[in-house]
Amino acid sequence: VTLPGAIFIGVWKSKDLLTPHMVAASLIHEHLHQKLYLLQNRFDLFPPQETLIYSPWPKVMRPPAAALHAVYV
């Protein structure tokens, strides 16, 4: 299922509800991802990416666009 612009967050962490501040931070985080995805779909922001670079979020090799998402968000 594709739901462009939809944001899904979990409000439970273990047995506790997230604090209102954590819910707000999660919404902002996901909104920024959506904003960048929409810009990427509208404009050619990046050339085709075959090269992978090290990303500390998580500690894996990723395309440069994925690393940009991590930094931007």
Image: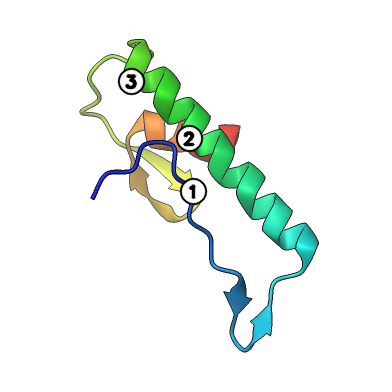
Q: Secondary structure at mark 1?
A: loop
Residue 49's place in the image compared with 1, above or below, is above
Q: Image check: 71 left or right of 58?
A: right
How far, Cα to Cα, is label 2 from label 1?
8 Å
State the residue at coordinates (69%, 59%): 23
**Residue tagged by mark 2?**
34
Residue 46's place in the image compared with 14, above or below, is above
CB contact under 8 Å: marks 2 and 1: yes
Mark 2 neighbour class, 10 Å CA radius: few under 14, some 14 to 19, many 20 or more: some
Q: Image check: 19 left or right of 15?
A: right
Instruction: Name which residue type carries label 2.
Output: Gln
Q: Image check: 24 left or right of 67?
A: right
Instruction: Name which residue type carries label 1.
Output: Ile
Q: Nearer the viewer, residue 44 or 56?
A: 44
| Mark nearer the viewer, 2 or 1 | 1
Q: Secondary structure at mark 2?
A: helix
How far, Cα to Cα, is label 3 from label 1?
17 Å
CB contact under 8 Å: marks 3 and 1: no
Instruction: Say whether disc 2 or disc 1 marks the residue closer to the N-terminus.
Output: 1
Q: Nearer the viewer, residue 69 or 7?
A: 7
How far, Cα to Cα, is label 2 from label 3?
10 Å
Instruction: Say whether disc 3 or disc 1 marks the residue closer to the N-terminus.
Output: 1
**Residue tagged by mark 3?**
41
**Residue tagged by mark 1?**
7
Q: Position of residue 67 (x, y in %)?
A: 45, 36
State the residue at coordinates (61%, 78%): 13
State the residue at coordinates (65%, 43%): 28
For this orientation, the residue located farthest to the top is 43
Q: Quadrant of the C terminus?
A: top right
